[in-house]
Amino acid sequence: MTVARRLVPLTVALFAGRLAGAFIAFVTQALIARSWSAATLGEYLFLLASINVAATLMPLGFQVVGGYFAAEYRAARSRRSLRAYLGQSYLQIVAVIAILAAFLAVARFWAAPTNTLRDFGLPCLLMAAATAFIYVNGAVLVGLKHPVAGLFADTLLRPLLAIAAFFAVACFAGMAQPLIPLMWIVAIGYAGIALCQMLLTHRAIRTVGDEAPPAPTMRGRWWRFALPWTVIALATDFFFDIDLLLLGHMMNREELAVFGVCARICSLLGFGVATAYTVMMPDILESAVHRNEGDFLRRLADTNLVATGFAIALTACMFLTGPLLALMFGSRFADAGFPLGIMSLAFVIRAAFGPASLVLSFYDRPYAGVPAAVLGLVSLLIADAILVPAFGLIGAAWGATIATGLWCVTLWLTALRNLKIDVSVLPRLQTILCGA
């Protein structure tokens, strides 16, 4: 009971912080669209997508499994192993930063005076580097039981920094390119936040015991766990960011802004759907640990049913209220309602076919999910290339939904074939129909 009393308010605080951060980011983007222009918002969303994708690639998946290894080494009282893991993560980030910096240095000589790479390359690289370090340090802090310090930098402090930078730049009216100083302010501020979090991380590591020596095979384990999650994380958490980067070469910035607004609203939807899994996943995994397959399948099926029902309800709300939400960004976004409803269908598909990636990883089959993730990204590229030139924004919305469907179905079939477990909502629906 003591554990429950401690965890419930902490969980509520973390969810509230994430929702508050998402709302602040939503307001910031609406302010950019209304105060500057829809094209400026499109450019801003394109830059954010570039930063998120670069930051995800820099640690090569080590940020995804960092919490797992931090918890393992804390329990084993192996501080040197944890320091080695963190050092390896930092080394990979620095190596990728050096490669990108060299590319920027060369590209600036050939960039046009108003080229995006020339204007925003350096602040975006600085912000991507800060984000990558925050991903890694945040995961380690969560594994060391400091979730607030681990999660709030990205979920709350970054949106607060962005809206503060907007108001700072807005004080100087008539600026020709307000996005340039805004990105510099956010990048420098976020680098400062990353440095503070890094200090907190190393302070937390000092509390870990130092009794167990590092295992000689630990680096192989790191790579085996981390590498597949590089692709899986891109195909799941940053699916819409990759889509924005693809569409940035097919749409003008105003159209891209409309799609980006739909994507951000859908991200809020995804957070709501993920809540069901976040609440129930500890019980699901506990059943799996105890090899209670019947209880495991029942809990998984019940959670899928709740998540799917929630996703259907939210999708219906998006078809009804989507145009009103989009109009917060200005009259240019009046046509966003129907595409928003189409894109919301993707979360119904994801909920219906269940958390296959997580279940595969738990059963030590993380690589099995990589082909499905690659198929999803390739199908997204093909769908955009075919549908966007012909149907514009509607085509982009259908392309994202179709790619999500192919990825989820393939991942579900992979789990069914490898584990003989149906992670979808279908078993629960069959039980309900048979009972009726």
Image (cartoon, rainbow, N blue to C red):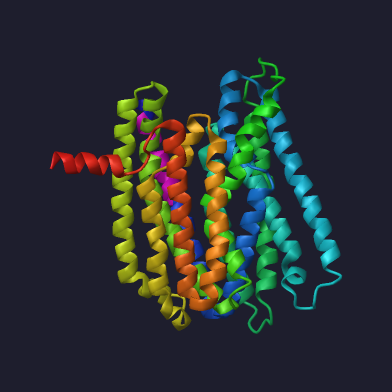
Furthest residue in direction front, as rendered: 417
Which residue is drawn at the image coordinates 47% and 33% (left, top)? 418
Relative to 148, residue 323 above or below = below
Image-based side of 187 in relation to 157, left or right: right
Q: Which residues are magenta?
A: 4-16
Furthest residue in direction top, as rendered: 211
Relative to 184, residue 83 above or below = above
Residue 95: say if magenta: no
Residue nearer the viewer, 408 or 159: 408
Residue nearer the viewer, 80 or 386: 386
Image-based side of 41 in relation to 403, left or right: right
Which residue is drawn at the image coordinates 29% and 45% (left, top)? 305
Relative to 414, residue 251 above or below = below
Image-based side of 299 in relation to 244, left or right: left
Camera sees residue 153: no
Q: Quadrant of the C terminus?
A: top left
Q: Quadrant of the N terminus?
A: top left
Expressed as whole percent of the image width and height from the top left, the position of residue 222 reads 65, 31
Q: Quadrant of residue 72?
A: top right
Q: Quadrant of residue 227?
A: top right
Expressed as whole percent of the image width and height from the top left, the position of residue 423 reads 38, 39
Camera sees residue 197: yes
Residue 5: say if magenta: yes
Which residue is drawn at the image coordinates 69% and 70% (left, top)? 181
For the stretch drawn in magenta, the main secondary structure is: helix
Residue nearer the viewer, 77 or 372: 372
